[in-house]
């Protein structure tokens, strides 16, 4: 939770106007930051420099005003509450019955005994303590009736109210002290100043509300209320008194927070409504023969689902391959492909439906060609859904979660970007290579989100409508798509590709083929962005990104050691195959180490991209069925007959462009799930087999699709970014202008440079 939200969430609602105006001060800091960048880009304008100096003075003036506001409010509340406590204490001491504080003679209980649940007269040790007012009134008779039941209830209410108010006053001081520290830390970080330590020491801590003596006096008054309450109602048991009063304090805090939470949600909605957006009503269609209407999105999904069902039923009854199992499997393959392509239901839901359809359709065959029994088929399907490849995917998720959770990825990225200077072209190149590098370890799903947060200091200081914003966002998105091919764990499609490579290429060969292609592709994309958007002309200098200054912790060192060990073992997997057997065994290392030592917890496990895991599992189950039924081999033989006379480079070119088109319009992972198995069978059945070459080339080509906003997770993340007015930075036109030529160049590199490298290693 951001501190501004935390401040509002923990503040006393009735006092909200008397806390530090944190958001207002933060906006002022960002305004000064933007003016500094503008002044740097307009160095010849002396008015800009004087404006910055005035803004700095304005910030200090605002700080002083906030400090004075807190001083005045605290002094007023302190005097009010202390006077109220003194008055209550005096009236209590005057009206308190004083006779027989310790006695052993008890009369029958009075109605007041119901008010006191702490006295048990059956235990003599309870009588050795000073008895409470209500206990004394309950166990003895006296003529003075000044303390009746109503007065006791009123006394309890006043003491609890005082306790709550004094505790809130204590919290008020602590929250405001934190607010001053946070806002001054933000000032020094954003504006590269050194105001925090000096202002806190000379101004804040010298102000009466924040002095240690003031806090001690306040704590003493709270303890005084606790003792009075204990003597009055708990037979002198301070611990019991505190427990009872804290129950009321918790109830009050819960009520306040519920009220504040509703206000925060309401303000957030108002903020969203304030954005300049065209509010278009959702398009609907009438449902025939009814008065109801259906939303356009739901109608599209429903129609796509019905079309898929109709095609599925038709294909089940058409004899295409002259084999029942192959016909049924082909119908299932087309049905799944249409469902995945149209997203009639979520992608992972389609994957979950595949195992259910495979077994009843009886499409699985034994090695001798006989049809498997339902029990054997279900066992085969489920065994294919969990393999070393899936465990490797989970291992990659655990590495990504640890690197992100402990700030390692962000620290690395910020240190690199802080050295990139302020020229837009070099900042763009740096952020693109940072994105590509991070994709190798934390996947191209998480990397764009991290990089977008890193460039926020630049984005907020750009002029409205600046082309630099588009340039940076596109650079991150496209570099992340390219980075999706850099390592076996950088994207789900690579995991699918590894499933169909035998022998496993290992990380060394993968790096050898993917890194040269990726590096050249990033430079090509960078050149296209400079050519199209000309960022240096728009803004000569950008705001400099500051490196994180946090100290290295033991957890960070531990995470790095485990990560390096895991990657080293993956790279040496081919040499250790005799001992470890599979990359999935190595992937178990970060899983049991991180979760076993508490580096990652249950919430981190729940945050894994389980939808991607289920999608991959469904694809593997379908691939197993297509192979077992004989359909895959039949399709591969028919394709082979048409291309067997072509050179391997030409075959790779055909498949690479086929996958490029497919992955541009649908998920990269879905493209791999459908086409890579076919590519493998074609490669195996060539006169001179080149299965691994074609499969790895096809797998790399899945990451080349980046021409549309829907082409992969990075593009989807980028197109959702909005400016301060709620207007999207990017449109489909932006992706087409840069994404199409970049996609083509990457694909050409795959079947030329990639082919040369893979051929050189014996593929």
Image: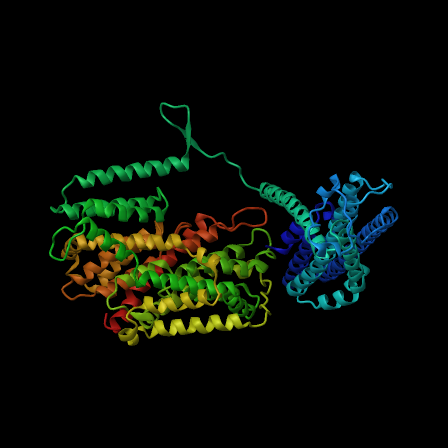
Question: Percent position (x, y) of residue 53?
Answer: 74, 62
Q: Is residue 553 left or right of residue 521?
A: right
Question: Percent position (x, y) of residue 595?
Answer: 45, 64
Q: Residue furthest bottom?
A: 575
Q: Quadrant of the C terminus?
A: bottom left
Q: Is residue 197 above or below residue 725?
A: below
Q: Is residue 660 left or right of residue 279?
A: left
Residue 617 position by quadrant: bottom left
Q: Is residue 259 above or below residue 563?
A: above
**202 or 79, nearer to the observer:** 79
Q: Exactly how many numbered labels are in the figure? A: 0
Visible residue check, residue 159: yes
Q: Residue furthest front?
A: 105
Visible residue check, residue 532: no
Its colouring scheme is rainbow
Question: Percent position (x, y) of residue 292?
Answer: 42, 26
Q: Residue at x 22, y 47 (%)?
A: 359
Q: Is residue 462 left or right of residue 223?
A: left
Q: Quadrant of the N terminus?
A: bottom right
Q: Is residue 361 left or right of residue 547?
A: left
Q: Is residue 706 above or below residue 107?
A: below
**275 or 472, nearer to the observer:** 275
Q: Residue at x 13, y 47 (%)?
A: 321
**559 or 713, nearer to the observer:** 559
Residue 291 position by quadrant: top left
Question: Percent position (x, y) of residue 201?
Answer: 76, 67
């Amino acid at each position: 939770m951001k501190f501004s939200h935390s401040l509002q969430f923990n503040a006393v609602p009735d006092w909200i106007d008397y806390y530090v105006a944190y958001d207002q001060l933060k906006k002022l800091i960002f305004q000064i930051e933007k003016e500094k960048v503008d002044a740097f880009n307009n160095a010849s304008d002396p008015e800009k420099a004087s404006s910055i100096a005035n803004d700095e003075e304005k910030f200090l003036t605002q700080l002083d005003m906030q400090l004075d506001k807190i001083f005045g409010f605290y002094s007023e509340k302190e005097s009010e509450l202390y006077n109220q406590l003194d008055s209550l204490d005096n009236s209590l001491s005057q009206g308190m019955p004083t006779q027989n504080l310790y006695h052993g003679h008890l009369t029958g209980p009075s109605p007041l005994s119901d008010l006191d649940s702490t006295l048990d007269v059956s235990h003599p040790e309870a009588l050795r303590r000073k008895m409470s007012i209500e206990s004394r009134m309950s166990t003895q008779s006296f003529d003075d009736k000044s303390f009746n039941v109503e007065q006791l209830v009123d006394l309890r209410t006043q003491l609890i109210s005082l306790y709550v108010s004094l505790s809130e006053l204590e919290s008020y001081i602590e929250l405001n002290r934190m607010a001053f520290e946070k806002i001054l830390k933000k000032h020094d970080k954003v504006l590269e100043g050194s105001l925090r330590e000096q202002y806190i020491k000379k101004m804040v801590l010298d102000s009466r509300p924040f002095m240690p003596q003031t806090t001690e006096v306040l704590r003493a008054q709270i303890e005084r209320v606790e003792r009075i309450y204990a003597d009055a109602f708990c037979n002198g048991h301070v611990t019991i008194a505190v427990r009872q009063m804290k129950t009321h304090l918790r109830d009050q805090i819960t009520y306040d927070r519920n009220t504040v939470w509703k206000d925060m949600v309401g303000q957030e909605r108002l903020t969203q409504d304030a954005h300049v957006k065209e509010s278009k009503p959702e398009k609907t269609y009438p449902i025939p023969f009814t008065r109801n209407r259906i939303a356009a999105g739901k109608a599209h999904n429903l129609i796509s689902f019905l079309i898929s069902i109709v095609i599925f039923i038709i294909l089940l009854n058409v004899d295409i391959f002259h084999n029942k199992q192959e016909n049924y499997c082909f119908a299932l393959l087309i049905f799944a492909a249409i469902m995945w392509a149209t997203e009639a239901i979520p992608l992972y839901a389609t994957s979950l439906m595949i195992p259910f359809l495979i077994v009843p359709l009886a499409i699985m065959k034994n090695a001798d060609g006989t049809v498997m029994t339902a029990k054997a088929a279900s066992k085969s399907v489920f065994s294919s859904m969990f393999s070393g490849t899936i465990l490797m995917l989970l291992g990659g998720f655990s590495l990504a979660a640890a690197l992100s959770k402990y700030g390692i990825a962000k620290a690395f990225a910020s240190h690199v970007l802080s050295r990139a200077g302020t020229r837009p072209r070099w900042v763009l190149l740096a952020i693109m290579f940072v994105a590509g590098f991070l994709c190798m370890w934390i996947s191209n799903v998480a990397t764009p989100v991290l990089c977008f947060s890193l460039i926020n200091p630049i984005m907020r200081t750009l002029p409205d409508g600046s082309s630099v914003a588009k340039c940076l966002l596109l650079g991150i998105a496209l570099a992340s798509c390219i980075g999706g091919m850099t390592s076996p764990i950088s994207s789900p499609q690579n995991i699918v590709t590894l499933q169909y490579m035998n022998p496993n290429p290992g990380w060394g060969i993968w790096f050898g083929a993917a890194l040269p292609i990726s590096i050249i592709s990033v430079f090509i994309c960078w050149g296209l962005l400079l050519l199209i958007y000309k960022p240096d002309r728009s803004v000569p200098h950008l705001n400099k990104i500051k490196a994180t200054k946090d100290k290295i912790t033991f957890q960070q060192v531990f995470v790095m050691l485990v990560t390096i060990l895991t990657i080293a073992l993956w790279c040496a997997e081919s040499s250790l195959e005799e001992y470890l057997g599979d990359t999935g065994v190595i992937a178990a290392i970060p899983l049991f180490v991180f979760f076993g030592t508490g580096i990652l917890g249950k919430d981190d496990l729940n945050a894994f991209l389980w939808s991607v895991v289920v999608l991959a599992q469904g694809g593997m189950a379908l691939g197993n069925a297509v192979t077992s039924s004989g359909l895959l081999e039949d399709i591969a033989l028919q394709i082979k007959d048409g291309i067997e006379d072509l050179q391997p480079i030409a075959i790779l070119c055909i498949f690479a462009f086929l996958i490029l088109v497919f992955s541009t319009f649908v998920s990269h992972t879905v493209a791999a799930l459908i086409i890579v198995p076919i590519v493998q069978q074609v490669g195996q059945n060539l006169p001179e087999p080149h299965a691994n070459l074609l499969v790895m080339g096809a797998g790399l080509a899945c990451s080349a699709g980046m021409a549309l906003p829907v082409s992969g997770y990075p593009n989807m993340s980028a197109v959702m970014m909005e400016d301060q007015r709620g207007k999207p930075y990017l449109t489909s036109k932006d992706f087409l202008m840069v994404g199409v030529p970049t996609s083509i160049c990457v694909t050409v590199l795959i079947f030329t440079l990639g082919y040369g490298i893979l051929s050189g290693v014996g593929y």
